[in-house]
Amino acid sequence: MKRIIFLIMTMAFVAIGCNKNLEQFTVTPSSLEFSGEAGSQTVTVTAGETWVLKINGGGSWLTTSKTYGKSSGQVEVSVTANSPAERTAEIVFSCAGQSVKVAVKQAPGTAEETVEKGEFYPEPTSGIEVDPVCPNADKPCTIIFKPASDNPLYGHAGELYGHFGVVVDGEWKYVPSDWGVADEKVHFKKVADNYWEFKMEPSIREYFGSGETPVTKIALIVRSEDGNTKSHDEDQFCSVIDDKYKAEEFTPDPLVTKKLPEGVKHGINYNTDGSVTFVFYDKDTAGKSHKYCYIVGDWNEWTRKTEGAMYYDGSQGCWWITLDGFDADKEYRFQYRLGNTSGTDTYVSDPYTEIVYDQWNDQYIAGVPAFPEGAKQLVSAFQINKPEYAWKHKDFKVEDKNDLVIYEMLFRDFTTSQDIEGAMAQLDYIENLGVNAIELMPVQEFDGNLSWGYNPNHWFALDKYYGTREEYKDFIDECHARGIAVIIDVVYNHATGSHPWAKMWWDGANNCTAENNPWFNVVAKHEFNVYHDMNHENAMVKEHVKRSLEHLLTEYDVDGFRFDLTKGFTQNNTLGDVGAWGRYDQSRVDILKGYADHIWSVNENAVVIFEHLADYSEEKVLAEHGIKLWRNMNGTYRSAVNGGSGDFSGSYENNLYGGWVSYMESHDEERLCYGAGADASSVTWGICGTLTNWSSDITMAADGAFFSAKNVTFKADDMFKIRKVGEWNDAFNYGASTKGYKLPLNTEYKLTLGSGSQDMAVPAAGTYDVYFSLAAEKVWLMEAGKRPADPSVTPGGGAAEDPLTVAMRRAGASAAFFLTVPGPKMIWQFGEIGYDYSIDYNDRTGEKPVVTDQYMAVPARKALYDTYAALLKFRRENPRFFDSDASFTWTPSGNLKKITCTVDGKSFHVVGNFAKNQTSYTVPSGTWTDYINGGTVSGSITLKEGEFRLLTK
C-alpha cells in the first residue's frame, strides 16, 4: 500500500513538472507580415526543453535560421523577393506535445518568379525542358521538347506523344496513357520545326489524378505515335514542389483472416437480406497478397475506415466484406485500396463492375455525374435494385447462321453524333439495305472516348461515350424488331494498363505488367500483340471471360460475338516466327472451343465468329465445331474495283460450307473504293524501285501523249514499277505480267494493272528514257534521246464516262460476285455507297468523315446502294440457292467472271465484265430473267466495263 501511495505521489510530481515546462513554452509574435521585398524578422521562443519547427506551405521562398533548439532562443525568419502574387505559409513550433503556429504572409512584389531546379531535371541530351524548372504540384507546367540534331526524334514528321508518370517509391504511378497509343491526353503540339510543347494542366496533380498522393517527382519521355522511337533511352525525371500533401501516416487495421461465405463469386454479390458482399481476388504468382485492402466509396467519404477493412481468405486468395444499410434504389460508386509494401496504396476498380466512372474522360460525356473527390482513376459501382428493362422482342433468334450478311459498324464514325441515338435514327437505312445482322465494333469499356475500342479495360461494363445501358438495350431491341441480329466484337486477347488486374502488379519502370502478375504475360507469346497479353490458360482468366460473355448474352440479349485476335489465345511462344504462330495448336483449340461451348450453353443459337487467320488445318477443326472464321478478301476485291481482274476464289474454297465469314473490306483493311473514282489522267506518275528505293519515286513529267522520265540510270539488277507518286494503290500500280520481266529496248510493252502487277527489269545496266502511256497502258524503255511514236488507242466502246461512275459500277460487280456466293458475309459500314476516304485518313484509327447524305445524293453512289439492296433482296427471296445442297460453280478469276447455281429445278447465273473495255457475252442457253434490270435475256449481250447481270430461270 505504501508503495502504491509512493508511486502516485511520484507520478503527480512528474506531471506537475511537465505542466510547468508546458506553461513556459511560448512563441512570439504569433504572425509575421513581410513586404514584397526580400527580408527577415525574428521570432522569440521560450521553452524549458527541446523544441522543433516545420514549415507548411512555404516552399523555397521561406527559410529559418534553425529548425530546433534545446531551450529558449530566437529564430530568424527570411523570405525572398516576391513575384506579383501574395504568398502565405505557417511555421509550426512543437515542444513536449504542445504546438504553436506562427502565420507568415508576404505582400505581392515586382520580382520575376524564378525557381531553381530541384534534385531531378531532364538531361540536356534528352531535348526535354520543363517550365518552370521546378514546378508546383498545384500549378500547371509546360513540357518543352527541342531535340538536337543527334536526337532520334530530330526532324520527326509525324505526331509526338508523351509518356508521363508520378514517381512513387521509385515506381511510375498514375500513367495517363499506354505506350504507343495516339491519346490526346499526352499529345504534344508542334510549335515550329523541332519545337514541341505539352501543357500539363489545370495542375500537375489534377492532370495525373493523383489525389492525396504526394507529387514530388515526375517521369517523362517523348515518343513517336507508335512508340518505336523515343527521345531518350533512359527515363527522365523532374522534381516537383508539393506543399499540400506529405507522405501520409497511416496505420492499417490488424489483418483479420476469415473464410469466404458459401456461394459467393468474385465481384459484387447481392444478398437476399439487402446486404452486399464484395469479393476481390488478390494473390500473385508467388502466393502473396497486398498488405491490406479497404473498400472506399460514396458511403464512407472515400476514406480508409475500420468498417471498410476487408477480411482475407488465404485459401481462396480473396479479400471480402459484407456491407448493409444501402438505399436499394441508389447507385453507389466504390474502389478498393490495396496496401503496398512500400507504404503506398494502389487504387483499383472491381473487374466485375457493370459500369465504370473515369476520372479523365467522363467530363466530356453529357449526363455523367461529377467524379467523386477522394477517388482516383477508374471507379466501379453497384445498385441493389437495378432497373429492369422491358424487352419487346426477347423471342428473337438467328434462324440461319450460314446465311448471315453482317454490317460492321463503328458507332463513333457511323453518324455525326457518334452515339447510339444517332445510329438508331439510321436503322431505316440499314433495314432498307437488307442486311440481317449488325456487328458492333468493341463497346466494352475502353480507354478514352474516341477509339476503335480494341483497348479494353473492363469486360462487364459497356462504354458510356456511346450511350447508357438502357440505350444499348434499346438499340438491340429495335434491331430485333427489324429482324436484325446484333453481334458484339469482343477483345479478350489483351487489356490495357487501366485494367484492375494489370494495375495490381505493375512494373512502372518498364510500363508493363510485373513478372508476378498471374493473369498477364510480361512478354507476349506472339508477334502481333498490343497492350498486355492475357494468359488464357489461367483458370481465373477463363472464368472471367466466360462470365462476361454470359453477362452480355443475358443482360443485353446480344446474339453472338466476333472474337478479336483469337490466334493469340495461347501460351505457346512463337515470338519471332509468325509462321509457327499460325500452325495447328491443340491447346489454343481447346481454349477456344471452351469459350464457344459456354456461349452455346447460354444461347444455343448464338453466333460465334473468330478473327483467327491461322492455318487451314486448325480453322477446319474450329469450323466443324460450329465456329465461323473471318476470311479476308480485301486485296483481290480492291484490285477488281480499282481496275484489275482479281481472283475471288478464296471466298468459297475447301468446301467448308458456312465456315468462312468472307469480307471485301473491314475496319482493319483499306477501303474498297479508295482511289477508285480518281481521274488517273490527273495523277502524278513516277518510277519506283531499287534504282532509288521502294519508298520514293522518280517523278515523270507530262510529255505529249506520254508521261516520261529521261536519263534514268539503272543498274543491271534494278527492278521497278510505275505508280502514282508516293502511293501503293491498285488503281495506280502498273508492272509486268511476270516478275523480273526484262523490258525490250525501244519497243512497247503492255502493262498489267493492280495487285497482279510484277516488278520489271532492264535488259542491261545503262541510262534510259522511260515513256508511259496511261491511255494505252503501255511502257517504252528507250535509248536515251530516242522517243517512241505516239501510241494508237482503241476505244473501249460506248460514250466516255467519268471515273467515279465506272468505279461504282465495278464496285457493284464485285458485290455481285461476293453476295451471291454461299456462306456468311460481312460488309464494312458505307462500303455500299463506295466510301473512299482512306483508312489512314486522320491516322488509321482516327475519326473519319460521315458523308452518308452527301454520298446518297450522288447518282453513281446511290446506284451502288441500290445494287447492294437488290442483291440482298435476292438472297432473302431465294434462300435455297444458298443451302449446302445447291449446285454452285463459278469462274472467279479473269476479266469475265461467271457463277451458275442450281437447286430444286431453279437456276441463277451471274456474269461480270472486269476488263477495262466493254465486251460481248453469250448467256447460257434458254431465256433468262434479268433480276435487277427486268425483262428477259437470251443470246448475246454487251457488258460495259464493270457491268454485271444477275439472271434467273
Image (spheres, grey):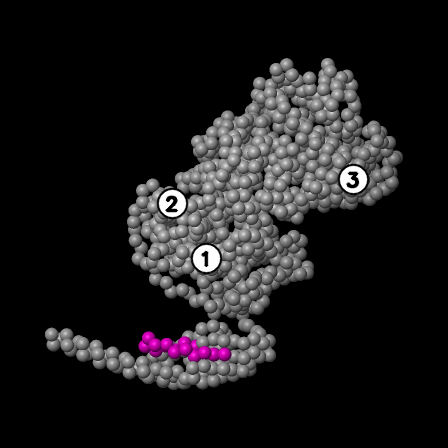
Q: Mark 2: which amino acid?
A: Tyr
Q: Is residue 93 magenta?
A: yes
Residue bearing mark 2: 270
Residue bearing mark 3: 679
Earlier-in-chain disc, 2 versus 1: 2
Measure the C-alpha gap from mark 2 to mark 1. 23 Å
Horizontal and vertical percent position of residue 898 = 69, 22
In the drawing, what numbered circle is on residue 375? Answer: 1
Q: Are marks 1 and 3 in contact (CB under 8 Å)?
A: no
Horizontal and vertical percent position of residue 730 = 71, 36
Q: Mark 3: which amino acid?
A: Asp
Which residue is found at the position 78% from the left and 39% from the top?
Answer: 680
Query: Within 10 Å of the Cα at label 3, are there few (<14), some (14-19), or many (20+) other Cα atoms?
Result: few
Residue 509 can be seen, yes or no: no
Which residue is found at the position 45% from the left and 73% from the top?
Answer: 56
Q: Is residue 164 above or below residue 416?
A: below
Magenta stretch in the rendered image: 91-105
Q: At numbered mark 3, what does the secondary structure look like: helix, strand or loop? A: loop
Earlier-in-chain disc, 1 versus 3: 1
Q: Is residue 428 magenta?
A: no
Q: Is residue 60 above or below residue 543?
A: below
Q: Mark 1: which amino acid?
A: Ala
The nearer-to-camera label among 2 and 1 is 2
Query: Is the N terminus in the top left, top right, bottom left or bottom right quadrant?
Result: bottom left
